[in-house]
Each structure stands twice: as structure tokens, then as C-alpha cells.
Amino acid sequence: MASIMPPIPRFFFLYVEPCLCFFGGALQPVLNPLSITSLLPPQLAGRGTSSPEPTPLETMLGLQSATLMFMISMVTVGARVYAKDPKVVHAYVAASAITDFPHWASFAYVLGWEGLRQWRTWETPLWAQLFIPVFTFLFKIGYLGGFLGEERVVDRPREKKGILSIPGTHELLAHSVQMPRAKRPLGEADPNASRRASNPKASKTSTGRIRKKADGQILQGDSEEPSNLPKHNATRNNPPEKALISCPKPVTSTSPEPTNREHKFAANSRYRLHLPGSKYLTNVNNGGGTNSVHRDQGSRAGSRSVESESTIHMRDINYKTKDNSKLRALLSDRCMSTCGSREELISRLEKSTFDYDTYSSEQIVELLNGRHLKNTSLGSKEVKIQRLLLNDSLDRDTSNYEDVKLYVQVDVSRDILEGLVAKQEAMLTEVDRSYSTSTWTLAKLRAVLKDRKLASSGTKDEMITRLRANDRKMLVKDISKAEQRYHTLKQQLEAQIGHPVEDTDLMKTEQSVDVLDNKLQSQAQMRRPGKPICDYNWRESHWASRSERELWDICQCRGMPASGPKAALIKWLETGSVEYEDLYAGSLEMICYRRGIKHKSGEKKVDLILRLKEADEQEENAE
């Protein structure tokens, strides 16, 4: 709570008020229980004895008052140190201010009119009990009203992300989901299967397989995992640790080999921050850079492939038009030093003969994640490199939050300015039809004039003319303010990125790069081979001639707990077991529902399999 307050209220609420509550309200009654009754004049105190020693009732009241004030002081300190929500802070201060009124009312009720008239005879403790709350009340009202300064915004700590720290989640998840095939003798299948009245139950093994019972005996099989697989529990709440991949040494012709200090600086010099839901801007150059990827749509042949449209080489990139943050990002991705002036950074990149082929596919994925691109693991290594080069051609660093924020502010302020200028031109060139005489009544016109502090006398046409003139005057002021704000933000952006920004639409170039990037993703998606749900070889089986419906009826009679594709059904009939991976996701949901396993509707198949395997392990450990 204190961290969001201005300096003066923070000092008062954190130190002054708790000390007043503790020393004046809690400690004083403990040391002198008569301090409560001595506040009132003798005729109102009501003491039945003249002894200087406190009575038991006075001692009890003093200790109870001290306990309450001690609690208030502790709650005040605790709430004002740990509360971060401004609403909670304001509610606490407002409640504390409201309680001052019952405090004053209690003294006024006990003193009465006679006691209030004799204010000249009041003792110093009574004056302190009445006027110290006035001082604290004014502070509380001043803080709530904003008269003591504006509140501060406490930002969340930003998380630094390493450039080449590749998470090993996909590899570990693959080991946890794709369990090894168990070695088991094939069960003898009945070619003339018939419906049975009994429904044999299914059993579960530690490898995630569903086994069936036949004639009271479980089919024997090897349920142990090979010892060479990693043992872990990769769940959604406890992801495996990230695996660090070393940075390969880039090949440079003239630049010296970076030292260990430069490697360390390059690996920690960038903040990978994300601003979701924003449409970013990019700088438009005049001579190169992003123009190398902004092709003429009309000159392209219809048969040209996506690779030929999006192929970019490092020699085609114009580094002189890049933002400062983009230059450092490119150097960091190449494991080169990011120190020096803008000219030194550009010279270092132009002299470098670095090639992304020196990186592995996993490292390229990590670089794409650092640029905040989507579907980074899609496609081959060549496709990933082309996507990375497409992003290199942009002048803006897509992962730098501060630059993105300024780009968006400049773009919005320019749009506002252009809208106001267009409105002014429309007023000058076209007939002004605002404040139509058919829809605006005299009462409505007078109300608008009164609100703008203009004269409301005259005829209806005179009022409309007066309002239109005022609109033009206000529009000129709005244009002046918008123009000043636009130029201020533009100067801040140019000072931060290191080069001038053109007064043009900055989104067009980045949109063309996004189109090419989406085409690369679509082509990689189409080239991805389809993976069957169950890879069991069923075409040579004697069950292959049966339809999937017939096979499912037979499997239901033999106790198969869930459905799957035709390959899974035949696998169940021939081997007596299937794996969770062989079944449909909807069937896995039904298994979770029957076993009472908590899951979400429409949850991914991988997550359902993990939940089922964890439940199997817990049941085995319980046994």
C-alpha cells in the first residue's frame, strides 16, 4: 500500500499515524489507567473514590482500550505495507477517516452542552484527543482527494529470457507420451466371434496400456520400461527443466572473435517482452531494407512458388535503416558484441559473414520465439531460416516493448491529427450541415450554448451560426494540440530508434512481410505428413474385411472400454491391449469421466493421456 502512495502520505501513514496509535492510544493506558477518566472534567468522570489508585473497572477499561489501539496500529502497518490494490488502499483510508466522526460524537455526547460551553477549562489530554484526529483526518482527505500528490504505478518485474536457452519440454513430453511397445505374445483370436453375455473388465498397466481379461486371466506382457529412457513426471503444473543449448561460433571474416565477456553481454542484452493484441508499426525506408521484400504484386507470375517470393539473403539487408534495438538484436542472435555506437553496430553487421546454417533447428526455433513469431516449430530448418530472414528484413525489433509502445503512440496520434485535418477541410469545402434546424430545437440549442458559456439570445439561425463558429474555433485548437503531441512523440521515437521516421503509413511494409510469412507457414503445414492415430499394421489381418462398425460391436462384447480407429480395434482383437495414444480424444474423456479423473471438456489428447497415466501410477503406488 505504501509503495503506491506519494512521499508525504507514505511517511505519514507508515510512521506518524502508527506511532500515534501505539504510544498515545495503546501504551499510555497501560502505564496509567487513570488517563482515560482524567480526560473528562471531575464532575463528569463519575469516580466513586478520591484514591489516586485506579479502580479495577478503570484498569480493565484502560487495558481493553490499549488492546484495541495496539491492534489498530498493527493492522495499519500490515495493511499499508502489503496491500497493493489501489481500491483496497482507498477503502482502508476512507474507513479510517469515517471512524473519526464516532470518536468526536462520543466526546460531545458525554460532555453535553454544558461541558462544550466550558471549553476553556479543558485539560491538555482532552484537547489532544479531540484535535489530533482532526490533523489525521485532514491528511486522509488530502490523500483521497489527490491534493498531496499522485499515486505511483508499481510495475511487475520483467523477466529476462536467454537468447539460446531452448526449453526441452517437447522432447521430454514425447518420452512421456510415446511409451515403448511392450513385448508380449500375440493372443489367439477367435475368427468366429459372437456376442457374449458377460462383459470382461479391463485392467491398466504402468505403461498406459489397456489390457483385457479373458477367461479370468490377464494376458501376459512386459510392462517394464527400458532403462535408457529418462524418468520424469512432465505435467502441466510441473514442467521439466529447460535445456540450455550452446551458441555456435559464428564465422566472421574481419571482425575479431568475441570474448567471453562479449558473449555474456550479448546473451543478456535483450528483453524478450510481448504485447498481445497490438498491431505493430515498422519504419519505411527509401533505399533498401524492407523494400527488398516488398514486391510488386502485379508483376508476380501465378506459378511462382512461395520460396522464390520469400527468399532473402543477408547481403540484401540494409542495416542502416534498422532501429537501434533491431541492430542489437541481430548482433545478439549472431553471438556478437552489442557495445558501441550506432555506426559501429552497423559496420559490425555489414562486415559479418554469419550464416544461420551454423545453428541447429532447435536453436533457430529459439531465435524465432525470441522474435515473438508464431508456429516456430513448423517446417524444416530451411523454412525456419527463411522466416528468420524475413523478420531480419524488418527495421523494427518485434520483441522490444518500449519501441512498440512509441510506434503505436506515434501511429495513433498521426491518425487523430489526420482525422481532425480532414474534418477541417470538409468544413471549408462543403456546406456545413451541423445543427440542422429540423432536428435541433430552441431549448436544445440554448442548452448547448449555455454549456459552452456562449450567448443564447437571438433567433434559431443566429444560434446555429454561433455554434458552428465555435466548432471551427475549437477544431483549430484541437488540431494544434494534436500536431504538437504528434511531433513530440515522433521526436521521442526518432531519438530512441536512432534514425528519422517518414510521415507515411508504417504498416504496409510489415503487412507484406506477414503475408509472406503466413505463406511459408501454410506451405510447411501442407507438406507435413499426416500421422495416423494408431500405427498398427492391420491390412493383412483376417479382421480387415470387417467394417469399423462391426469391429466396434465385437470389441464392445469383449470389453474394450473406449473406441478408436479401425487399426486400434483390430489391435485390441489380436493382441488384447491398446495404448492410450491409439484411442480417440473423446474416448479418453469418457475414461476420465468414468474413473473420476478431473479434466476439462475439449482438453488436448496429450494432456488427457498424461492425466490417465498419472492416475495409473497413483493407483499402482496405492496398491
Image (tube, rainbow, N blue to C red):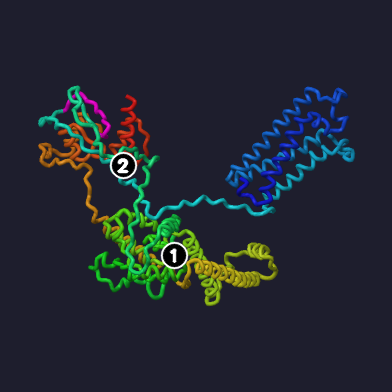
- If the image is split into quadrants, where does the N terminus sit? top right
Q: Is residue 584 positioned above or below 462 on the image?
A: above
**Residue drawn where x is 18% and y is 34% of the image:** 183
Q: Is residue 19 positioned above or below 283 on the image?
A: above
Query: Residue 616 at x, y = what percent?
Result: 31, 31
Look at label 2 and name its amino acid: Val
306 with respect to 550 (left or right): right
Q: Nearer the viewer, residue 254 or 195?
A: 254
**Residue drawn where x is 53% and y is 77% of the image:** 429
Q: Is residue 290 visible?
A: no
Query: Residue 564 at x, y = what percent?
Result: 23, 38
Query: Residue 226 at x, y = what percent?
Result: 24, 36
Callout 2: 10 Å neighbours few (<14), some, many (20+)?
Answer: some
Distance between the alpha carbons at the discs numbered 2 and 1:
37 Å
Query: Residue 73 at x, y = what percent?
Result: 68, 37
Q: Nearer the viewer, residue 481 or 166?
A: 166
The boundaries of the magenta stretch are: 195-209
Q: Which mark is residue 606?
A: 2
112 with respect to 470 (left or right): right
Instruction: Determine whether the residue tagged by mark 1 lies in a helix, strand or loop.
Output: loop
**Residue drawn where x is 77% and y is 38% of the image:** 104
Q: Which mark is residue 281?
A: 1
Task: Give whichever of discs 2 and 1 has the lower sequence position.
Answer: 1
Q: Is residue 208 magenta?
A: yes
Look at label 1 and name its amino acid: Leu
Q: Is residue 571 visible?
A: yes
Q: Is residue 466 magenta?
A: no
